[in-house]
Image (tube, rainbow, N blue to C red):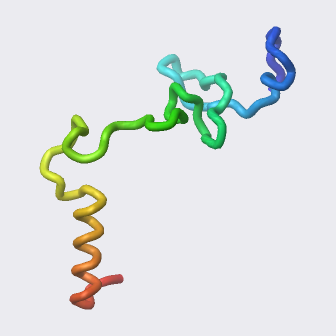
Amino acid sequence: MERNTREPESLRLTPRCGATTRAGTLCMRPRAKGRTRCRLHGGAAGSGAPKGERHGQYKHGRYTAEAVEERRAIAELLGRGK
């Protein structure tokens, strides 16, 4: 992909984020180090919603990672595991 910009060649050749923006185009910001998205689209450390009850969509906790793992362990003990 050739871009006509004044940025240095090393920056021009870095992999891009590629997330879809609100306008429907691809994000052209460089990816965060060790990530597949830029810092604005989820590549920053600590990005994402808080876990558990602090999350805005939390309702009852039935599908939290801990609850799902507990149900799997019980099913395994009862011989119903896959």
Which residue lies most toward the front here? 45
**Left-right relation of 4 to 75:** right
Q: Quadrant of residue 59?
A: top left
**Left-right relation of 19 to 74:** right
As drawn, 36 above or below 25:
below
Q: Give x and y (percent) for residue 51.
A: 30, 45
Which residue lies most toward the top here? 6
Q: Give x and y (percent) for residue 42.
A: 50, 34
Q: Identify the image quadrant of the C terminus.
A: bottom left
As drawn, 30 above or below 61:
above
Residue at (62% x, 33% y) in the render: 32
Q: Identify the image quadrant of the N terminus.
A: top right
Q: Of residues 22 and 7, which is closer to you in this image?
A: 7
Q: Quadrant of residue 18?
A: top right
Residue at (47% x, 20% y) in the render: 22
Which residue lies most toward the right here? 9
Residue at (29% x, 84% y) in the render: 76
Q: Give x and y (percent) for residue 43.
A: 54, 35
Which residue lies most toward the left here? 60
Count the marks. Answer: 0
Q: Of residues 44 and 3, which is closer to you in this image?
A: 44
**Left-right relation of 46 to 60:** right
As drawn, 7 above or below 54:
above
Q: Give x and y (percent) for residue 27.
A: 60, 24
